[in-house]
Amino acid sequence: MIYKIKLHNEAADDLYDLAFVIRENYHAPLTAQKYTKELFDTINSLKIFPAAFPVCTQKSVLEHYGHTTRRINYKKKAILYTIVNNTVVVLRIIPANTIT
């Protein structure tokens, strides 16, 4: 089964903000483009078998995103997502070190 990918509004904002910071604050437009492409590649990898990653047990994830939230990392970012029927819903893209 191939799952659909849906970015929640907050995840889309996270992605936009991340690209903006890399492009504008660090004056690195090519790096921003490469980073976001690779991040999207990681997200798209969830189309095949999103349940391969376990449900998160960290307290902050459980409190803010619920008991069905899963996590995949890309570099220093945590991609938080849930599976609803045949859709992977990406909830947030946040710094991995902020999860406790």
Image (cartoon, rainbow, N blue to C red):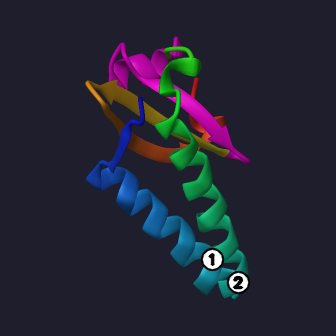
Answer whether residue 85 is magenta in the image. no
Residue 59 at x, y percent in the picture = 48, 15
> To which residue does mark 1 refer?
33
Q: Are marks 2 and 1 in contact (CB under 8 Å)?
A: yes
Q: Is residue 13 left or right of residue 45?
A: left
Residue 85 at x, y percent in the picture = 26, 24
Q: Which mark is residue 98?
A: none
Residues at marks 2 and 1, CA–CA distance in whole angstroms = 5 Å
State which region is magenta. Answer: 56-76
At numbered mark 1, what does the secondary structure look like: helix, strand or loop? helix
Answer whether residue 75 is magenta in the image. yes
Amino acid carrying label 1: it is: Gln
Q: Residue at x 54, y 66 (%)?
A: 18
Badge 2: residue crowd in 10 Å (few <14, some 14–19, many ≥20): few
Q: Is residue 36 left or right of residue 60?
A: right
Residue 92 image-quadrant placement: top left
Q: Which mark is residue 30?
A: 2
Amino acid carrying label 2: it is: Leu
Residue 93 at x, y percent in the picture = 49, 47
